[in-house]
Amino acid sequence: MTDTAIETAGLGKRYKRTWALQDCTLHLPTGRIAALVGPNGAGKTTLLHLAVGLLAPDAGSVRVFGQDPRGNTKALAGIGFVAQDTPLFRDFTAQELITMGGKLNRTWDAALARTRLADLGIAPNLAVGKLSGGQRAQVALALALAKRPRLLLLDEPRTAALWAASSRASTTR
Amino acid sequence: MTFIGILFVILPVFVGIFFGAPLVAREVEQGTHRLVWTQGVSRKHWALVKFGLVGAVALLLAAAYALGMGWWFGPLTANGNGRIVPIFFDVQGIVPIGYTLFAVALGVFAGTLWKKVVPAMGVTLAGYAVVRVLIETLARPRYLSPVSASLPINSSEQINSDSGAWVYSNGIINGTGKLVMPDTIIHCSSSEASPRTAEVNGGVGLNAPGHRVDAARRISLRRGGDGDGVKVLGLACGDGQRSA
């Protein structure tokens, strides 16, 4: 597979007058695990938010599998994204979050998420706000994987480490 | 009882504060927008379902509230001020439904703009109060020009309190049409009013014992609130007693 997963050209994003990301041109092929490294405030999160269409670029362009991800449900269906601090609806249980994901996505592998959490011994009927931070990260990762995404974007080092370490990393690519 | 009355008047804004304001703001504040807006459902779809659901619940609550208040106020308005006067008008019929939906929309708007729940709630409350006061003090009295009616002081006609007119002001005018006593109502019995003065003043006159007062009452009406029909009032006469 030599397809392109993410391609950006002269990408820039500005918050008021400060540029968070400027002149970013990159080419990320499929079939790879790539790490984005940089000091705090380098624009890593901004780049990922641009890639999942949460932000609109102020300069340049970003394409995911050749498509503009912004407002594009087709492109978003192919991206599994775990945001920083693994945001989840804290009153929901893991089981409810899996149900929610099923209603918000056309392709959804609920069984994958369920077995993954069961293997890790995470209670499916406990509000996720009561889980430990590491367990919440596992729930967020399971939700991202249940989309069976072509591209997995992890903006949370903890989930990235969990995923890389998990025995399923090679099989759920 | 007064407290309950006030509570009912401000109830619509609470729907906006607690249902409308957190709708988008809480999502952004807790960061969960990054979860829900990156699923396979467009933001427009998400917003339509969310706003539609909250809007529908608010509509149902407001309709139940309006019907309940109409039932509760029915006997009071029939025997009192009519249902067009401020406060009475604002808690019945379609008015509270409109207010409630407006408050929800304002809350959603404020929450989307400020992205923090508590400031959005405050903005909703303040914005609602400002709009509400402006409508009541500036807009509503100007929808239609008032209808003025001058009636002879010895007329046997009476103000019909059941007709639902919004009485803006009333007072006594003399034979030349000059306002001599604002905010006053005079009663006189028609038997005591002399036909002579009535002739002289073209049906506007009063002959109280020992005095001669040429007077009529001027009544200004507004068309009922935001669209009810105009009702013309009559007036009552007594023995020169005054009641404000």
Image (spheres, coloured by chain):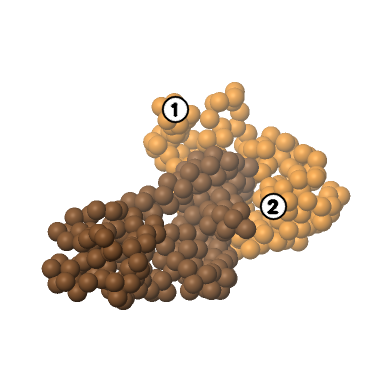
Chain colours: A orange, B brown
> Which residue is located at x 82 percent, y 52 percent?
A126
Label 1 and label 2: CA atoms lie apart by 32 Å
The numbered disc on residue A157 is none
Q: Position of residue A69 (x, y in %)?
A: 48, 49
Q: Which residue is mark 1?
A: A19
The residue at the far right in this view is: A121
Q: Is residue A143 visible?
A: yes
Q: Position of residue B215 (x, y in %)?
A: 23, 62
Q: How many marks?
A: 2
Verify CB contact (< 8 Å) between mark 1 and mark 2.
no
Name the quarter where the C terminus of chain B is drawn.
Answer: bottom left
Q: Nearer the viewer, residue B207 or A24?
A: B207
N-terminal of the two: label 1 or label 2? 1
Q: Identify the element where label 1 is drawn.
A: strand
Q: Residue at x 64, y 38 (%)?
A: A84
Does residue B203 appear anywhere in the picture? Answer: no
* Residue at 60%, 46% in the rendered image: B26
Classify residue B159 as left or right of residue B204.
right
Image position of A155 (left or right of A111): left
Q: Residue B191's image quarter?
A: bottom left
Q: Which residue is mark 2?
A: A143
